[in-house]
Image (cartoon, rainbow, N blue to C red):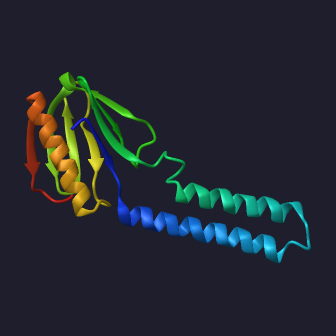
């Protein structure tokens, strides 16, 4: 397994619903205020349309979560982080699989934590399987942390 993309269905459904509502508000705004023809009304409608598209496309693709194992580097793009994190295999001391987070204990820097609180059970299981296989293939130490919210 070299690539894993997390598709959080409840989160995606909520975001799509918000996007559809924003686009409907924009269309109704244009219809209701078409006679006024003010620049403010047009700018507001365009803003609502762009916001709706942003929500429907998961932030134009920015808000996707994925993990890629490329050679000896683990690349992680997580939904609550703007930047991609690249972790060399030689830097990982251990991987701790918890109920609410996955923690990478690194040799030279502070631990790197992935929060799992918003994920569904299927997503968590696929994530646990990915990291278990990754640690087995690379010979890394992996363990489960039973402590809640740690």
From this view, report whether residue 135 is shown above or below residue 33. above
Extreme-bottom residue of the structure: 32
Is residue 150 visible to the viewer in this orientation of the structure? no
Residue at the image position 71 percent from the left and 68 percent from the top: 26
Residue at the image position 18 percent from the left and 57 percent from the top: 99
Coordinates of residue 81 in the picture (x, y in percent): 41, 44
From this view, report whether residue 7 is shown above or below residue 135. below
For this view, does 50 lie left or right of residue 75?
right
Coordinates of residue 144 in the picture (x, y in percent): 9, 49
Coordinates of residue 138 in the picture (x, y in percent): 12, 28
Is residue 98 visible to the viewer in this orientation of the structure? yes
* Residue nearest the observer in this picture, 133 or 142: 133
Residue at the image position 74 percent from the left and 75 percent from the top: 28
Residue at the image position 16 percent from the left and 36 percent from the top: 134
> Residue 100, located in which quarter of the rendered image?
bottom left
Coordinates of residue 86 in the picture (x, y in percent): 33, 29
For this view, does 56 lie left or right of residue 24?
left
Q: How many marks?
A: 0
* Residue nearest the observer in this picture, 99 or 71: 71
From this view, report whether residue 127 is shown above or below residue 12. above
From this view, report whether residue 148 is shown above or below residue 111. below
């Amino acid at each position: 397994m070299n690539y894993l993309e997390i598709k959080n269905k409840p989160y995606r459904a909520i975001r799509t619903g918000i996007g559809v509502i924003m686009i409907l508000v924009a269309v109704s705004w244009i219809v209701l205020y078409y006679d006024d023809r003010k620049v403010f009304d047009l700018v507001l409608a365009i803003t609502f349309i762009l916001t709706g598209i942003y929500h429907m496309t998961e932030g134009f693709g920015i808000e996707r979560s994925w993990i890629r194992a490329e050679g000896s580097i683990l690349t992680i793009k997580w939904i609550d982080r703007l930047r991609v994190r690249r972790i060399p295999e030689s830097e990982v001391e251990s991987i701790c699989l918890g109920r609410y987070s996955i923690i990478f204990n690194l040799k030279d820097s502070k631990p790197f934590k992935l929060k799992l609180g918003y994920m569904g059970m299927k997503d968590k299981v696929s994530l646990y399987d990915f990291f278990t296989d990754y640690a087995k293939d690379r010979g890394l130490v992996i363990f489960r942390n039973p402590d809640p919210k740690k």
